[in-house]
Amino acid sequence: MGSIRLTFHSHSAGLNRLTVSGVVRLMLGSWLVLAPCAPANANPVVRPASEFPVATDARIEQVGEVVRLTMALSRPVEISASVMAAPDRAVIDLPSVNFQVQPNTARKSAGFVSAFRFGMFTADRSRIILDLAQPAVVAKAEVRKVRGGFGELVVELKRASRAEFQAASVRPAQQSQEGPASQAPRPHGETRQLVVIDPGHGGIDPGAVVASIAEKSVVLAFGLALKEQLEAGGRYRVMMTRDDDTFVPLGQRVKIARAAGADLFISIHADSLSQAQDVRGATIYTGSERATDAESARLAAKENQADAVAGLDAAEDVQDVAGILMDLAKRETRTFSSVFARNLVEKLGGSVKLHKVPLRSAGFRVLTAPDVPSVLIELGYMSSPKDAELLNSPSWRAQAVGAVHNAIDGYFTSTLSAGKAAANQR
């Protein structure tokens, strides 16, 4: 059997993107094709939210031995309910619903229910989740018809022993969310770089919620503005992991970028620290098995729970691929990620306030693509009154988007120049 020899060259003056990850993309091409991602024609037809039944007037209360959730609906729908462990929660699945309920309503508690949340789960399904402080089972789950053709959702939970809860609980399914990943890899003859923008959270996962403002809405607005500006220049192709208020699992976000052959992946978030409202400013994160500090580790752990928040199995995907090649690709990709992260700190620092330690790293699941340079931008802290004001300011958003755009331009200009210089030296 013949052997394969790989020779890599390093150049202190710059980096050539095709040194390792390009080889890996070629040699592991069959693995990339077989990796689970959305098939090209899998997208369901998405109806506008105006066609969905409307949910209003959510109320949770303890009534005797049970905790009852009620929600008014513009028309009756079919629902199903179950309980799930690790973390303990009750899950109510229903068709697509337009939730006209204030986000801070979900922070209310009653008895053994510590909080609840709601939102779109897939393109054609919504979900309500009640967090359980103690074991409980579903005693009732129904939608009653009421006068005028309206409906009323009623879910009642009753306290149970741990054994009863375990017997009733179901294992959350691995969600195969279909979404923008259906776009084909780079078209033949296409020379523009592909930037994938990943607005964090979405749908049933609101992220941080401060004064009725949800993180998912703030970062989506930023992502859409960045996409518009990048496309207006004509230099880049741009893909969004989500472009509306829908939930996308963490692993799927990575697969979207990999399946499309992305040249850069940017995940956008806005953190919240309830105990430190004076902390503010933007922070740039790169992926790493070991966090640079305790705060970064805390944030990564919180963001990595997004799938569990939505009622999914939070276990990480196992990637059984050629070890040494993948390790080399990860090293090179992280080098490129660091180059872009430093560019972001430089450009953002000239336009918006940065955290006192603006460049960090931690084990974020969305930053695990071995062959796509990836960063996570925390735009600021929603728990800071000043940051919250800026995050919702169109003028601040335009300024910050412009800075990120400049950082992307600078990154590709430097790496492409370095690649050409490296090729000329061979």
Image: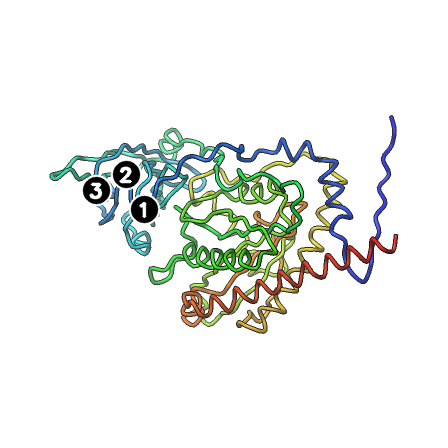
Q: Nearer the viewer, mark 2 or mark 3?
A: 3
Residue pointed to by mark 1: 113
Considering only vertical position in the picture, is 206 above or below 294? above
Quarter of the image where one finds residue 319: top right
Q: Secondary structure at mark 3?
A: loop
The reply to whether callout 3 and callout 1 are in contact (CB within 8 Å) is no
Q: Residues within 10 Å of mark 1 (few under 14, many from 20)?
A: many
Looking at the rendered image, the quarter that the N terminus falls into is top right
Mark closest to the chain's N terminus, 2 or 1: 1
Q: Nearer the viewer, mark 3 or mark 1?
A: 3
Q: Residue at x 55, y 40 (%)?
A: 183
Considering only vertical position in the picture, is 7 above or below 399? above
Distance between the alpha carbons at the discs numbered 2 and 1: 9 Å
Considering only vertical position in the picture, is 91 above or below 285? above
Residue 74, x across and y down, in percent: 21, 42
Residue pointed to by mark 2: 157
In the displayed structure, does residue 171 sit left or right of residue 260? left
In the displayed structure, does residue 183 sit left or right of residue 331? left
In the displayed structure, does residue 201 sit left or right of residue 355? left
Q: Secondary structure at mark 1?
A: strand
Q: Residues within 10 Å of mark 2 (few under 14, many from 20)?
A: many
Residue pointed to by mark 3: 74
Quarter of the image where one finds residue 87: top left
Dot 3 amino acid type: Ser
Distance between the alpha carbons at the discs numbered 3 and 1: 26 Å
Residue 77, x across and y down, in percent: 25, 34
Residue 244, x across and y down, in percent: 42, 49
Q: Residue at x 75, y 48 (%)?
A: 18
The reply to whether callout 2 and callout 3 are in contact (CB within 8 Å) is no
